Image (tube, rainbow, N blue to C red):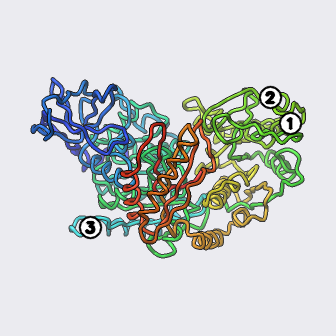
Amino acid sequence: MQSTPPAWRTFRCEREYIVNTYLDIVFDLPLDQSFSYRCDAKGEAAPGKRVMAHFGRRELLGYIIGGSNTPPAFPQADKIKAVRRVVDKESVFDHAEIALAKWMASYYLCSQGEALSAMIPSGRRAGTNLSLEDDFDNEDNAGNRLELSAEQDEALLGIGAMADAVFAEKNTGQQKTNNLHIAYLYGITGSGKTEVFLRLAERMIQAGRSVIYLVPEISLTHQTAELIGRRFGAVAATLHSGMTGSERLSEWMRIRNGEVVIAAGPRSAVFAPLRNLGLIIIDEEHDGSYKSGNTPRYHARQIAMHRSSQEGALLLLGSATPSAEAWKLMEEGSIKRFSLNRRLSGGTMPAIVPVSLQKTSGCLSAELKEEIHQTRLMGRQTILFLNRRGFGYFYHCTACGFELTCKRCSVSLTYHKSKNKALCHYCGYETRPPLVCPECGSLDAGFTGFGTEFIEEEVRNTFPELRIQRADADTTGRKGSLREILKRFKAGDIDLLMGTQMVAKGLNFPGVRLVGVVFADTGLHLPDFRAAERTFSLIVQVAGRAGRFFPDGKVIVQTLRPYDPAINRACALDIEGFYRNELNQRSVLNFPPYSRLIRLVVRSRQETKANKAASQLASLAGTMLPSGAELLGPAECPISIQNGNHRRQLILRGTSINALQQLTRNMQQQYEKETGVYVETDVDPVQLL
């Protein structure tokens, strides 16, 4: 697979050579319309290119989505401004990307310019191209194909047959719009899902079709990119936020020019401009990072569903802990499930032991300390996981009850001992930690709770002989640092690795015997209907790092709530029991997947303005609610103040997403906008904080 398949050597994207006098341009602004400009003096501007243009008193980056030689039909057309500068020498997007942006604008209730801005990499094209073949060392059995188990063979044959059926439909003209084909590779951690994904990708490329391979975390991007680079060489590309804008644009243009047949990366790689698309793979489908936190608040899974239905491709999802929505669809038969139930490489699922922290001093229980010691004696490795960085995260005075919170957000500050600062992880506010209670002057005050920094100090004091490394946002800020840490851990140069989510899932380390979940309760306290699902998934996923190559893996789950159903079932690996119970609760409470949601968040620096706008939107919704829909709120967001903005939310709930979208459009049109008030629209939200 190191050379370009013959079917792709002559493939080139469409180019627009016609010079238009007038151009239709959209901007990354919440304005649902295009604007007319004249072509530049050199005639270089054309649909698919980006330009700099005057917009009011500003100069903005715009996207040319069309053109004409006929003047626009409005007064004073002769005064239309010309674009100031053409950014691109060749088109960076074409009709397919324009159509996708139009659909995104309609579905996610944003503008077409905002959608294109999310799709197209920023920056100028780099002078040299990067390929996965250059970016990774081709060693360790580079390109070797592993022998498949019987389960993997069966899954490969079944999913391949589904792909053949999709292609047959398309080739015979039977493929219809929205005719969606979805397969799910459900397998325990370490069961070989990745190899099945790669074999299917090989099959697609040999048939002259292209592949998008999505992973949720940038830490997994490096590992997956390495595997893909070894297997496919120069015809593979990666797109992720760790690259500069120019590097990403360079890879984007390689894809557009037909030099690439498989593109890998996190969320935004779903927009890769591959043609003749045959397969979209979404690994760790359940992961919340596939949902964008900024406008447009798209979900990569939804974009993948749309692209696969429009382009006649197969959508393949995979996880050891499917989302509740996917599990329900598999149970109903709407998604075809293929299962992998046996660990490869000689490993077995580890023993998972819940340990109560009720009487534990510090962050390490006696059971966890003993297992770390035993693991070291065996010459094996340990991973400690806690989804909270910093040293302590809750400042409390026992004398007067004072709590130290962010001045701009309604959240507690986190103490970072290495910096001797109390930081807000939402807005970046920082201050020196007080020596005495700021309210009453008592010395009986300080930070409690523990983050990764606190754990590191206790582990170093308890096990001075261990080679210890912390991996979180504070220690992996330098480019390439996370990859370097993981490489050292895999090579056995680190005895104990502690970290946040970046060490929790997807990674494959042969030497790991023990995994410790330092505090499993963190996510359970969040006021969100997905809290139990996230907690269950994290425990099962992080537990999957242990015992992948040996049958003696062990997991210690420390908790203050050992009998909570989510924690209890995760420790018992009772997958079916958890989903059965969770879906029953969702059904009773009428939350997804038994309903659809649109969340509107109003924010303003003035509380009265935020309250007024939220009330106005609620009043509009109340007069226009369609049958089967309801309004929840308005109410304060759980994080009611963020970065100085007061936040209020309304949730529209119903059975038809189309009806909710139309309701929201009507509300947006009739809502009287006020200076200093912003309304964020989130279709299909994954969290309600």
Q: Which residue is mark 3?
A: 176
Identify the residue at image location x=37%, y=69%. Answer: 161
* Labelled disc at residue 166: none
Residue type pointed to by label 1: Ala
Circle 3 Cα neighbour tier, 10 Å, few/some/many (<14 / 14–19 / ≥20): few
On the rendered structure, is 630 left or right of 13?
right
Question: In the picture shown, does residue 242 fall above or below 57?
Answer: below
Circle 2 Cα neighbour tier, 10 Å, few/some/many (<14 / 14–19 / ≥20): some
Tag 1 and tag 3, C-beta contact below 8 Å: no
Residue 642 pos. (x, y %): 60, 40
User: As rendered, which of 587 and 667 lies closer to the eye?
Assistant: 667
Tag 2 and tag 3, C-beta contact below 8 Å: no
Q: Which residue is mark 1?
A: 445
Tag 2 and tag 1, C-beta contact below 8 Å: yes
Q: Which residue is mark 2?
A: 434
Identify the residue at image location x=68%, y=62%. Answer: 349
Question: In the picture shown, does residue 170 fall above or below 32?
Answer: below
Identify the residue at image location x=54%, y=44%. Answer: 610
Circle 1 Cα neighbour tier, 10 Å, few/some/many (<14 / 14–19 / ≥20): many
Residue type pointed to by label 3: Lys
Question: In the picture shown, does residue 194 fall above or below 217?
Answer: below
- Element marked by disc 2: loop
Q: Residue furthest bottom?
A: 332
Residue 273 pos. (x, y %): 32, 46
Name the mark nearer the viewer: 1 or 3.
Answer: 1
Mark 2 or mark 1: which comes first in sequence?
Answer: 2
Residue 386 pos. (x, y %): 71, 46
Residue 6 pos. (x, y %): 25, 48
Spatial CA distance of label 1 from label 3 is 66 Å
